[in-house]
Structure formats: C-alpha cells, structure tokens
Image (tube, helix red, strand yellow):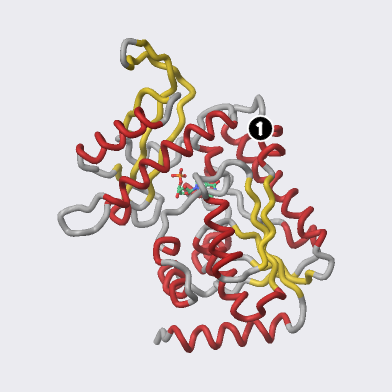
Amino acid sequence: DWNMPDYITEAVEAIRNQVGSDEVILGLSGGVDSSVAAALIHRAIGDQLTCVFVDHGLLRLDEGQMVMNMFGKNLGVKVIHVDATEQFMGKLAGVSDPEAKRKIIGREFVEVFQAEAGKLKNAKWLAQGTIYPDVIESAGKGKKTAHTIKSHHNVGGLPETLNLKLLEPLRELFKDEVRELGVALGLPHDMVYRHPFPGPGLGVRILGEVKKEYADLLRRADAIFIEELRNTKDEDGKSWYDKTSQAFAVFLPVKSVGVMGDGRTYEYVTALRAVQTQDFMTAHWAHLPHELLGRVSNRIINEVRGLNRVVYDISGKPPATIEWE
Ligand code: XMP
C-alpha cells in the first residue's frame, strides 16, 4: 500500500545512498515531473543539487519568475536561471517548418543546458523527472503512436555527451502518485495539478516563424484565458481549468480587419484551444460555456493591443492534434 511519509523517507534514503557526497544537476522546466524530482532530491541532498532553468523566450507569462520564486526563494533550492531568449530567437529567425522549429529548439536547449552543466565541474549525476509511463513509452519505441509523429524534445541524449550518471527517482511512479508526492513535499497544489506544457513551449503555438513580438502577444492572451478558466466554476463547483486537460491560446500570423472607436484596426488573430482527454492520444474539444468564451474574447481584444479577433477551435483529436504544430 502507498503510504506517502514512508515513501518519502525511503526515497530520500535511496537517493542519499546512490549519490553519496556527489553533486547533482537537474534541468528544471517548471513542469510537474521535473519540479517534483527537484523537490525530492533537494529534500535528500540539499545543496548538493543544482537546478538549471533555461528560459528559451517561449514560456508562459511570468513563468520564469514563478519558478525562481518557488524553488529559489520558497524552497531554498540552488537554481541557475539562464535567459537564452536572444539565442533561441536568433536561431529560429526565418524558420517556419514545424519539425525544423522543434529540432532547433531541442538542439539549442541541449546546448544551453550543456554549457551550464559544464560550468559545474564537480557534477557527477544528471537528475531527470522520468516517470513510469515515460519508461514504458521509450521501451515501446518504434511503435507508430501519436507521440512518435512529432519529435518530442526532452533532455534525452545528454548523459552520453556529459559523462554523467542518471538519477531518476520518479521512475516507478504514475502521474497521480507524482502529484501526491509533490504536494507532500510542499509544492503548491495549483502547480502540481497544472495542465501539461510542451518542451518547445510557445514555439509550437506560434504558427510559422517565431518572433518575440508574437510571443509577447500570445503570452498575454494565454494568461487571460487561463485566468478566466481558473476563476469560472461549473455547476458542480469545479473550475473549468480543472475540468479541462489542456487549454491554451495559439497565435495566428494572419491579420484581419476590425473596428475600435471610430477607427479601423488591422491586427492578428488568436485561437483558443481547450480539450478533455484521458491519455492525450485522443481528445475532445471542451464545451466551454459561451459566457466564459465571450468574457475571454472581450478581455483579450480590449487588453491586448495587436489582437483584434478571437476564434475557438472545435476540432477533435484525431484528426487534429492538440497542439497546432
Ligand atoms: P499533440 O499535439 O501531439 O500533443 O496532440 C499531445 C500532447 O503532447 C504534448 N506535446 C509535447 N510535449 N514536447 C513535449 O514535451 C513536444 O514536442 C510536444 N508536442 C506535443 C502536447 O502539449 C499534448 O499534451
């Protein structure tokens, strides 16, 4: 039977035995798995752990600050915050093919991470938030699943080049167990029950070429959508954020005409996507209340100058994927 305090005691003991007095590095993404891994390893070995948080300029609004506050300030974890926005934007300039974008983001990510890891001369271990379903999935590699249709970018491939041993303390846990563990380790409920966010971030939610200007508009639209989802409860008392599996805004590099006051506007379009799914392999679009959609649309158009039209994506998976790229 699953007993959380005992589990933590055992896991902490196992990590201490495994790494001894060695230093460990961990790529913190702000996602649930790497966050829980960081909290657990920090509980076990404290300052022997250094986390590296790479900001590729394609994160959600205030994400970097949130991660630094939670881990740096609240939990006292050593975190190196790397702002690599310029580097990523430079490499992505002029590239509009979705797979090419994913490859560039993955490669730069590894490069930035590796450069930081190289500075930590004494690190012997690379910690990763690999969970049990990831282990199963990579064992079945080669099977043509939805996950292999798009090249997913994770910090895979690093150990060989860095000569680090792998530390994966969540390898035996399912997602719900990882979340429970996160809460028990003191991570806020809202962070542990967040929707998943892809490694390439807003890079796959800005259609075609990625520009900082587009990312800035998208971040603001997305934040409004998420805020309204969190604040709007259904009849059963659950928020629409909790009733959906994933929800986000997408930036369309298309301009359409609008009116504002006496003036004509000619600005970009944002699409809202919200889905319900068990396994992310198939998904239904969420039947969000019209009042909620209307409020989000009004707020985006009034608050985000540069966007003048909001549309709602009513495509299921299949045939559409959850992300637009
Ligand atoms: P799709 O768009 O294939 O997405 O229906 C299924 C789930 O996978 C996530 N996703 C990714 N996650 N790196 C990631 O870490 C990626 O490149 C990537 N592409 C898609 C997506 O957000 C959804 O949860």
Percent from the top left, x then y, of residue 42? Answer: 62, 75
Q: How many marks?
A: 1
Looking at the rendered structure, the kind of residue marked 1 is: Leu
Q: Secondary structure at mark 1?
A: helix
Asked whether residue 135 is in view, the answer is: no
Percent from the top left, x then y, of residue 208? Answer: 55, 27
Q: Residue at x 41, y 25 (%)?
A: 307
The extreme left residue here reads: 235
Percent from the top left, x then y, of residue 18? Answer: 69, 82
Q: Residue at x 70, y 67 (%)?
A: 50
Could you tell whether 2 is left or right of 62 in the image? left
Could you tell whether 97 is left or right of 275 in the image? right
Quick check: 248 above or below 214? Answer: below
Which of the 4 quarters of the picture holds residue 40? Answer: bottom right
Residue beneath label 1, please? Answer: 92
In which quadrant is the N terminus drawn?
bottom left
Percent from the top left, x then y, of residue 191? Answer: 44, 61
Q: Residue at x 51, y 48 (%)?
A: 62
